[in-house]
Amino acid sequence: MPQPPFILFSDLDGTLLDTFTYQPDGAEAALACLREVGVPLVFCSSKTFEEIVFYQKQLGIHAPFIVENGGAVFVPDGYFHFEIGLEKRRAEFWVKEFGAASAFIRQKLAGAAADLELDVRGFSDLSVSQLAALTGLDEAAAGRAARKDYSETLAAPSDPKSLARLERYLVSPGLALTSGSRFFTVHGANADKGRAAEWLMELFRQVHENPLIAAVGDATNDIPLLRQADKAFLVQKTDGSWVDAGGLPVELAPAPGPKGFDWVVRHLLRNV
Ligand SMILES: [Mg+2]
């Protein structure tokens, strides 16, 4: 495997993909540059397996990826040219799981709805057309978003007080609540983007000598990912501000979403 100038781990929604169009509007040239210089682009997203495979195909990317906020890592067959010691497979990928199963999460959310008398609804409780209306996705994309294996994204509640009560309730079954660009997601407490990324970065460090690993995101759920990288970047949120990085040294892209991603790629290509 030739040594790439750097490896880029990227969030999708609100980072490479526009928060509302779910397209890499304005990052097309940056994506072409990454392909040209052979930079592995690793998606690390709250999106599902089916969604990420869809975007990989659309954008012509062949690389490992992290689904559902760190629920699992998928490594294409033969990608690392050495045995990575995994047994679970899905399609042409090896799977390393970190997250709790979605069925368990849904069961606990039903318990929370009853015990706390809260309106708790996940994406899987909605019809595909309701989900399409809520997210702005078309129905095929909404279907891909709904088929989760390691998490559940909440359609309700959305008010801070109810979310705080729900978060406390989820502690004892070992679950946690994380804020993404638009929605809150419930997942196994020991699964976050950082743990999954740390495991995958170690594989890259086995094949390359001191690779420069950069990471870019836009939201709270990206901070554990950014913490694992050698160089961390935040793009602007839709309101033009940056999420609080909690004291972590990060470089701030002066643009939101894919335009911010474009800035990060240009910055990296200039400085490595
Ligand atoms: Mg995001």
Image (spheres, rainbow, N blue to C red):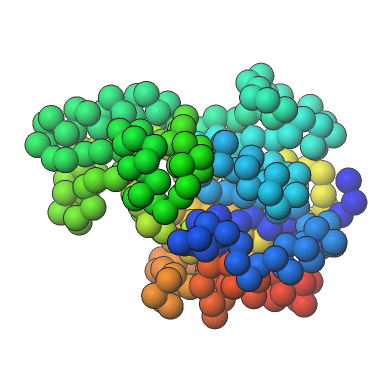
Residue 171's image quarter? top left
Residue 27 lies, with reference to residue 2, above or below; the image says below
Residue at (80% x, 58% y) in the render = 35
**Residue 27 x, y percent position in the rendering:** 66, 67
Residue shown at 72%/27% (left/top)?
92
Residue 73, position as x, y percentages in the image: 60, 37
State the image quarter where residue 211 is shown.
Answer: bottom right
Find the residue positioned furthest to the bottom: 254
Instruction: Indicate the quadrant containing the C terminus: top left, top right, bottom left or bottom right.
Output: bottom right
Vertical comparison of 183 with 78: above or below: below
Judge by depth and name the residue closer to the eye, 169 or 27.
27
Question: Can residue 106 be spotted in the picture?
Answer: yes
Q: Residue at x 25, y 38 (%)?
A: 121
Q: Residue at x 23, y 52 (%)?
A: 158
Q: Is residue 173 visible?
A: no
Foreground of the two, 151 or 119: 119
Residue 150, image quadrant: top left
